[in-house]
Amino acid sequence: MALPSNQKRKKFGKGEILQEAPPAMASRLSSCLDDIKISWQKKRNNIAGLWQDWSKIAGEPLASNCKPLSLRRGMLVIGAKHPQWLQALQYNRTQLLARIRTQGYEVRDLRIQQYHPRAKKNQLESEDSIWGRHPSRIDVHGIAKCSQCSSPAPAGEMALWGMCGFCRRAIILSNE
């Protein structure tokens, strides 16, 4: 008699008991992401797969200036950054739709519109550029004498606050 696949024997005293097998190891995050990617590729009616294949479908000049915006009920909305590219999309509409369908996407029709991509407002500056102009850098701004305590201080701090960072901190703490 064979054991069920989810059980195994364990010795207990003079006898044996059936015990459930330990659970399988948890899959790594990368394998989970690979599974999601494969499922996107299998489903040819979602926008994520279309975004991935867009440069191959549209070609480089169109792909860099036009983007798929949404795909609902077989209607693909494509946005163009400039009227020139909007016109290029309209002229190549039938060829583009044929290429999309040959890639396996279930697109019934195309709607072409102009769109203005939002500028990234929260683009952070690199640490190197911030540190390159920091007022405490003696190698960049040089060294000067503090007007409050007469000790050597970075010239950048002197130009910015009129005193060294230690004197400025003391004044801020005394005002609180």
Image (cartoon, rainbow, N blue to C red):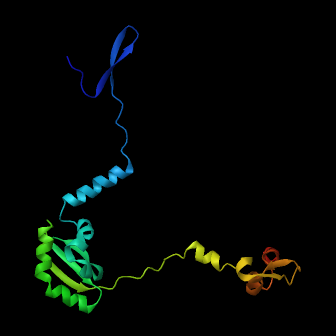
Q: Quadrant of residue 112?
A: bottom left
Count of residue discs: 0
The residue at 24%/88% (across/down) is 85
- Quadrant of image for the C terminus: bottom right
Q: Residue at x 21, y 77 (%)?
A: 58
User: Outermost residue toward the top?
Assistant: 14
Residue 74, position in %: x, y? Answer: 14, 71
Placement of 14 over or under 174, stated as above or below:
above
In x, y percent, where is residue 143? Answer: 79, 81
- Left or right of 33: which side holds 88? left
Give the farthest residue toward the bottom: 83
Outermost residue, front side: 139
Residue 109 visible in the current orientation: no
Which image quadrant for residue 9? top left
Residue at the image position 38 percent from the left and 47 percent from the top: 28
Residue 78 in view (yes/no)? yes
**The N terminus, quarter of image:** top left
Image spot of residue 76 (x, y percent): 19, 75
Q: Residue at x 29, y 83 (%)?
A: 65
- Left or right, 17 with reference to 55: right
Where residue 60 sits: x, y (%)? 26, 78
Quadrant of the image occupied by residue 71: bottom left
